[in-house]
Amino acid sequence: MTGPYSSVIDGARDRAGNDPIFTLNAEARSRATAGESILNATLGALMDDDGVLCTMPTVLETLGRYASSRRPAGYAPISGVPAYRQAVIEDLFGDGTLADQAVSVATPGGTGAVHAGVVNFLAPGQKLLVPEFYWGPYRPICHHTGRDLDPFQMFGANGSFDVEGMAAGLERHIDTQGRAMVVLNFPCHNPTGYSLDADEWQEVVAAVKRAGSRAPVTVMIDAAYMEFGGAAARSWIDAVPGLLESATVLVAWTASKSFCQYGARIGALVGLHRDEAERVQIDNALGYTCRSTWSNCNHLGQLAVTDLLTDPDLAERVGAERARLCALLDERIDVFNEYATRAGIPTPRFDAGFFVAMFTPDQERTAAKMREMGVYTVPIPGAVRVALCSTPVSAVPRLVEALEAGADAGVTA
């Protein structure tokens, strides 16, 4: 401060200037650079077993083809390149009935999609319903936009998704704020690695139908890790028609994970509703948000991703390259589950995705003990998040050993 006064408003003072995950990642990298043996399982980016960021040759080739032309140097349309917007819808729903009931806008990654959903489907002062284990940025997105977050218990006594906890939250929000919006980060939930099965999705549909008969309900499906979700990666789509009977459905879509282009910041928010007039309202509202925040998104990325989604040859090549990356990740998950089961590590059901969580009553003590052993994870309320996506398969035994020691530390007063 250069004078006796601060121009920073009270609500913006004393904020953390960086995400805790990136802070821990920087600390881990610093220790490794200094020569320590560090296992860094913090950042949600897929690395190969030599610690090199995974990319897809076909994606890089397609981006490069556009990078040498003038076309992407111009502004993209505010809501996104029309062909890109349609390609994302068809990537999710093909060309059937659901695609006919969908609109979309381009966003800067999945984070932009979540932001656009929150500011258009919740009023200032209202709360977003989330499971108790949730992707950390949901909270600052809500707080930065004058909304709030309301977590519900995620798992029941039998270890499955607590649909009744979600249903109670929906009813509570309808009673207190006249509407409800819930984020379901499935498949491959971040941070737990949990995916809903078909029966759980149908239970979710039933709960949303009950709530949607009383007041406006919005269900946002954060599908960031869908392409790494295994055989059941798109099973959630079967639930969408039932959800649409009484709710608006939003889908946060991103190229960050599915195309290994985290830095390109290419995403989309897809909105579905059965009423055409309401779809026009959604489309206009989302376009307004685009203009009033990021204005427009990465033009080069939209052009390249459109080709990758719609050109049959490119799509086939990308599919094969992604399949090899999925196999790399699946091997780590299989080895982790084997060692974790043997060690009695308390985790949710985990069969696909970038992350898994270990439950602990004292996440800070657990994570600190692991850092003493040179192993970095992310402490979150009630657990530590482990990024298998950046853990070499050869390091999994060391990881589980540190988790075991961290778990013991977490229960020691």
Image: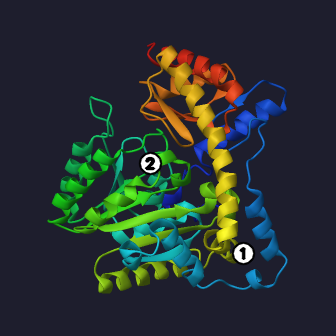
Give above or below for 384 relative to 219.
above
Residue 369 in sight: no
Relative placement, left or right, of 328 versus 278 is right
**Residue type at the position of mark 2:** Ala
Q: Dot 2: within a 10 Å radius of its alpha carbon, few (fewer than 14), some, or many (20 or more) residues?
A: some
Which quadrant is the C terminus positioned in?
Answer: top left
- CA gap, disc 2 and disc 1: 32 Å
For the residue labelled by badge 1, is the local secondary structure a helix, a strand or a loop?
helix
In the rendered view, does 87 fall on the left or right side of 168?
Answer: right
Front residue of 410/168: it is 168
Query: Which residue, given by chain and number where applicable, does mark 2 sit on?
Result: 232
Disc 1 target residue: 300
Q: How many marks?
A: 2
For residue 406, say whether it is visible. yes
- Say few, some or many: other residues with alpha carbon within 10 Å of mark 1 (under 14 / 14 to 19 / 20 or more): many
Q: Quadrant of residue 69?
A: bottom right
